[in-house]
Amino acid sequence: GQTPLRTKQPHPPEVAAFNPGHLARSKWIIKCLAPTLKRCDTAGRHLTRQSLERRKRWSKSVFTNRDRTLIIAEIGNNHEGDMGAAREMVDRAAETGVDVVKFQTFITEKFTSPVDPARIARLKQFQLSFDDFAELAERARAKGLMFFSTPLDLESARFLATIVDAIKIASGDNTFWPLIECCADSGKPMIISTGISGQDEIQEAVSRVNGRWAAGNIAG
């Protein structure tokens, strides 16, 4: 299974997500979801023309439109560092008719303590390169999907700003102000997991993002 990089918290109520898991498990999920999600045909072929057209119309409004739920396929690190598995997960997520695929992007040495070499070695097995993520983003868009990822370090955040449709902040980082401000400076839409944060912490995060957007003349 997926080795968690942070303690996972429930998704905010406005975001629906499912986790494809390993490929064998994702095939089972696809089989169950396909009859319900009308955008996928019974043979499991690629996205319909309508969903590709829908992709062209996406904008920041998808995050403020409360009449529609954004469906996110949480791939995370379930690829376990295998680019072939990552590609197939994108493809199979697209077959279900979801709106978004989401990954986690990190440089192990940038957010893991050097005093734990065993953990560093384990996490490096899950690490994909920036070039890999650029390819996955292009693959997702070719199939009519938006591409999100969660950066776990500042260098990854700066890179993701060049390829993603939105940036997700993990609940474990929702008071990591340098990361939040770096992502806000990109001007990309942001999703910040609240986890077990109190109202004051949540308001602080919102205020910092709004402040950076105002300073950069970025429309929120």
Image: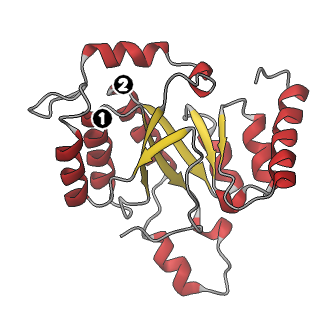
Query: What's the distance in space between the residues labelled 2 and 1, CA to CA?
Result: 8 Å
38 or 73: nearer the eye?
38
Marks 2 and 1, the one that precedes in the sequence: 1
Which quadrant, please, contains the C terminus?
top right
Number of marks in the image?
2
Q: Of the residues shown, which amino acid type is indicated by label 1? A: Ala
In the rendering, at what x and y percent does residue 214 appear? 88, 26
Residue in the picture at 51% in, 18% down? 58
89 horizontally vs 61: left or right: left
- Reply above or below: 80 against 74: below
Crowd class of label 1 (few under 14; some 14 to 19; many from 20; radius 10 Å)? many
2 horizontally vs 192: left or right: left
210 or 88: nearer the eye?
210
Q: Which residue is mark 1?
A: 94
Q: Which residue is mark 2?
A: 144
57 or 84: nearer the eye?
57
Asked if labels 1 and 2 touch by Cβ distance under 8 angstroms, the answer is yes
Residue in the picture at 19% in, 53% down? 28
In the rendering, at what x and y percent does residue 76 appear? 45, 55
Crowd class of label 2 (few under 14; some 14 to 19; many from 20; radius 10 Å)? many
Q: Of the residues shown, which amino acid type is indicated by label 2? A: Gly
Q: Quadrant of residue 82?
A: bottom left
Kind of element beneath mark 2 = loop
Which quadrant, please, contains the N terminus?
bottom left
